[in-house]
Amino acid sequence: MTTVDSQLRRLALGVLLPTFDGTTAPDWILDSVSAGLGGVCLFGRNVENDEQVAKLTAQLRERRPDVVVSIDEEGGDVTRLDYWRGSCTPGNYALGVVDDLMLTTEVAAALGARLARCGITLDFAPSADLTLTLDDPVIGVRSFGADPARTAKHVQAYVQGMQAAGIAACAKHFPGHGASTVDSHEGLPTLERSEQELRATEFLPFMAAVEAGVRAVMTGHLVVPEWGPEPATLNPRAIQVLREDLGFTGAVITDAMDMKAISGAESAQHASASGAVRALQAGVDGICMSGEWTEPGVVDLFADTIVAAVQAGVLPERRLAEAAGRMTELGSLRQVGSVGTVKSSDSDLGLLAATRALHIDGEPLLNGSPLVVDVMVPPTMAIGQVPWGLGGPMAELVPDIDQVIIHEDEADASAILTRAQGNGAQRRPLVVATRDAHRYPWVGRLIKDLLAVEPGLVHVETGVPGPNLGTAGRINTHGGSYACLRAAAQLLAGHLKTGKA
């Protein structure tokens, strides 16, 4: 390999953010970092605890101090540091419901301080999307809400808190995913909205993030017909709007390139590598490669495809160099903040925020030790297999409860009522916990069948609140993190006193 070829390959590696398996960095990752790899993205499979993550990031920086270490740690439902137990902080929607900008800043700053202690450089948060339809399958409680102006203020507060700890925040998913009814992990969403409509709604939180000095923006794999058939990640007009109209000067990073909106139905690696070239052509700087492809050959494939595009005159080398330079800048951003000036992260702050986010409808009262029914629906790929359910937090506070987990093929009201009756003369009161019940007709039918026999049923909804299904008592937690579920459990156990919504 000539010196010129070696330099070109280093630039190509410099825009890539792959992932890997295990809680220590494999040799191929370490060698790639030495060769110029832009950085890595950590997932739950890379995490045991904070101390282990700190050792992992130190291992990476031994090879190159400015390597970008990114993570998708939103808090709330989408967590990586707490992947195996659930987040100790509520997510954006709960914070938006509380609507205390200082609290949003404090939660973000505390999380940022924790990330800094772990050696993280870049956090793919906050979600700057709006919750614009109850049919949205992927954003939901990851958003601060539906109101553009209020959401913009919380996005700004979150960015300021996170970056006070020296962690680069990343507003996502430009131009805004919350009006979509298609999950871009599974297909290609189209936003039937004009650019003028986007400017009046979806753009406002991103504008606020830019005004707050956000260091990175993540593109969404979303088609805006007015911009042409390419999703924003591959669309020069989308990046032009972000740069010229919104004034963003930091690093633009793709959402994961293995998502079917880019790679196609078969999640083809070659299609995604070609997509990386098109994203760079459009003006993107960082390529978030995948959440699933963890073999070393994928990095080689992406780098080789990018190098070939430059050599063929398809991708200007100066464009690649510009992108790699912006990624290098992200690796040095911790110098801008001071971790020592930020409060330490602890579960007390998260529980306080989650408690303030509780909304009560009716009279959710228990006249005995309940049967807690956790109704399980498939999690999105963004959430993964993070533990969810009210039974665990309730059992910590009320040891003699009974609990059951129900999937769609087990949604039998009579079996649940028999379980509640047990061998006693008095049936246990029922508490049913759901996640976006309005999106699953079978969940609504189950609750109505239970209500026909047990009108005192308490419904705990942990997603975006849909219509009340007729229960006499309902608690909306506005998030499914451990902190939100713990707050609901404390309320039901009589450990909290709060007014109705």
Image (tube, helix red, strand yellow):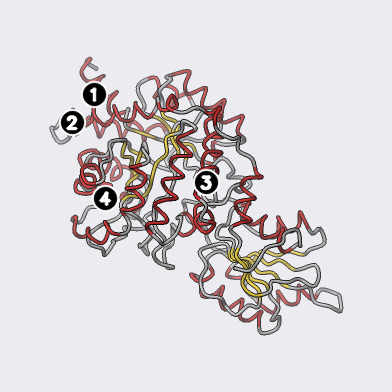
In this rendering, is residue 367 above or below 95? below
Q: Reading the chain from its start, which is encountered first: label 4 or label 3?
A: 3
The span from disc 1 to disc 4 (Cα, nearest Å) is: 26 Å
Left or right for 364, reference 289: right
Percent of width and height locating residue 427: 80, 77
Local secondary structure at mark 1: helix
Residue identifier under label 3: 102
Amino acid marked by disc 1: Leu
Residue identifier under label 1: 8
Q: Are marks 3 and 2 in contact (CB under 8 Å)?
A: no
Q: Nearer the viewer, mark 4 or mark 3?
A: 3
Q: Reading the chain from its start, which is encountered first: label 1 or label 4?
A: 1
Q: Determine crowd level at label 1: few under 14, some 14-19, many 20+ residues with C-alpha closer than 10 A.
A: many
Q: Foreground: 350 or 179?
A: 350
Q: Reading the chain from its start, which is encountered first: label 1 or label 2?
A: 1
Q: Foreground: 217 or 98?
A: 98
Amino acid marked by disc 2: Val
The tag on residue 379 is none
Residue identifier under label 2: 310
